[in-house]
Image (cartoon, grey):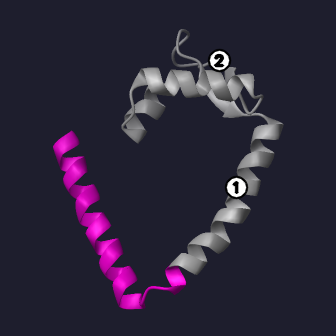
């Protein structure tokens, strides 16, 4: 969970609350962490995998429709801008 918080820029408390909710819903489960006994890993359950795949199937057409409204040049410019922002954030994080 600490890794999730770091990678997503969230607080550990918010990740912990979300994980508790997803466990209660049966979408994820805690599994032993071989590298740290006190910090469990989380993984999708079979129902969680099904929900995730369903979300991916809905997301792909949506993003394709959204992208179709922009020109290739605009998409390249957006990608380049996001890459610059990401690089800057990574430098500041180091």
Q: How many other residues sit within 10 Å of disc 2, few (<14), some (14-19) or many (≥20)?
A: few
State which mark lies toward you, 2 or 1.
Answer: 1
Could you tell me which residue is drawn at 27 percent across and 70 percent down?
81
- Label 2, secondary structure: give it: loop
Residue 48 location, quadrant: top right
Answer with mark 2 or mark 1, whichever residue precedes in sequence: 2
Q: Report which residue position mark 1 lands on.
A: 55
Name the spot of residue 17 as percent of width and height, x first: 54, 22
Label 1 residue SS: helix
- Where residue 32 is drawn, which disc sits there? 2
Camera-nearest residue between 17 and 43: 17
Q: Is residue 31 visible?
A: yes
Q: Residues within 10 Å of mark 1 (few under 14, many from 20)?
A: few
| Prevailing SS of the magenta stretch | helix
| Nearer-the-camera pick, 13 or 34 | 13
Residue 70 painted magenta:
yes
Q: Which residue does the image show at 33% across and 75% down from the upper left? A: 78
Image coordinates for residue 50, horizontal then vertical, percent: 80, 47
Q: Relative to 83, is 71 on the left or the right?
A: right
Front residue of this view, candidates 1 and 94:
1
Q: Is residue 20 left or right of residue 87?
A: right
Q: CA distance from mark 2 to mark 1?
A: 27 Å
* 71 relative to 52, above or below: below
Q: Position of residue 11 (x, y in %)?
A: 39, 27
Q: Is residue 94 visible?
A: no
Which residues are the magenta region? 67-94
- Relative side of 44 to 40, left or right: right
């Amino acid at each position: 969970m600490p890794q999730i918080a770091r990678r997503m820029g969230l607080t550990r408390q918010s990740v912990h609350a979300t994980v508790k909710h997803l466990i209660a819903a049966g979408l994820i489960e805690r599994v032993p962490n071989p590298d740290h006994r006190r910090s469990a890993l989380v993984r999708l359950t079979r129902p969680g995998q099904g929900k995730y795949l369903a979300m991916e199937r809905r997301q792909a057409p949506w993003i394709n429709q959204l992208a179709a409204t922009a020109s290739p040049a605009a998409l390249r410019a957006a990608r380049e801008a996001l890459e610059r922002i990401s690089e800057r954030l990574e430098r500041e994080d180091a």
